Image (cartoon, grey):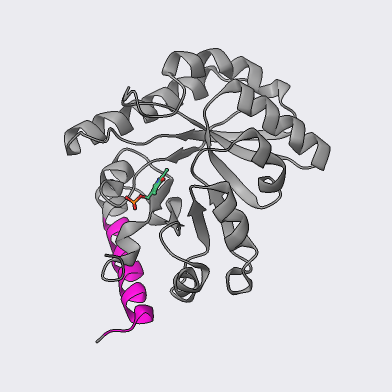
Amino acid sequence: MATHRELIAANVARIRERIAAAAQAAGRDPAEIKLVAVSKYVDAATAALLVDAGCRSFGEARPQQLWEKAAAPELAGVEWHLIGRLQRNKIRRTLPLAALIHSVDSERLLAAINDEAATLGITSRVLLEVNSSGDATKQGFTAEEVRALLPMIPNYAHLEVGGLMTMASLDGDDAVAQANFAALRTLRDELARNSPSNVTLPELSMGMSGDFEIAIAEGATLVRVGSSLFEGLLP
Ligand SMILES: *Cc1c(COP(=O)(O)O)cnc(C)c1O
């Protein structure tokens, strides 16, 4: 029987091959696409097997779990991404640990992160989460809200807004996911044309285990893959 280490190494290799193939099919350089390994399903010891398999960027959906894993010695040196909800009272502890916060979904949160970053004397990298599917259950700005926010971004001196993030509709098929991802890219292109000169929005965080190849075809630069990395391990 394969060990957990072997299973994860094989899963990571397969995902990387699929990322490379999807990039190639889209005429893109695979090096433009970062795999964010979503470790929320497993403990630090199991996540460390991903490090052994070459993963360097990890995503957690809950701030508290990000803090815990970031403190685990076996995960030292990993780059942490927060991909889920950030509550205001968790900002201070999260900012020094997170290389990128994918999930800023209100101007209030953007302002609060900027204030804390100023207090800490750092610049925080964030993405704006867009509800591209219109699902009532999804977080995120509408396209209209992001357009309105764009001219304000330079006021937040301690933030680097690097781009946009979205999730495809939960109950949609591949065609719906593709439409959601295309909408995010189109919005980003429009914003980049109209943005203040120091706001370039290079990043598109989109695509999970079920739809990352579609997202790459539509321009994803960050794919957030969790369950496919643990196939054979998780129930
Ligand atoms: C859990 C999660 C993922 C990973 O989803 P999988 O389908 O397990 O690959 C990606 N993005 C967000 C925001 C998540 O919460």
Residue at image x 26%, y 57%? Answer: 21
**Residue 85 shows in this picture:** yes
Confirm whether residue 198 shows in the render: no
Q: Is residue 200 above or below residue 79?
A: above
Image quadrant where residue 173 sits: top left
| In the image: residue 50, left or right of residue 199 | left
The secondary structure that most of the magenta stretch takes on is helix
What residue do we see at 81% from left, 42% from top? 120
Horizontal and vertical percent for residue 167? 36, 36
Q: Quadrant of residue 140?
A: top left
Residue shown at the point (35%, 73%) measured from the top left = 8
Q: Quadrant of the C terminus?
A: bottom left
**Which sits in the foreground, 87 or 159?**
87
Quadrant the N terminus occupies: bottom left
Whole-percent x, y for residue 144 in the image: 45, 13
Relative to 175, 197 lies left or right: right
Q: Which residues are magenta?
A: 2-21
Q: Residue at x 27, y 48 (%)?
A: 213
| Image mark count | 0
Q: Is residue 119 left or right of residue 66?
A: right
Image location of residue 102, percent across then percent down: 52, 40
Q: Residue 153's x, y, as percent?
A: 64, 22
Question: Does 210 sit above or below residue 91?
Answer: below
- Outermost residue, bottom direction? 1
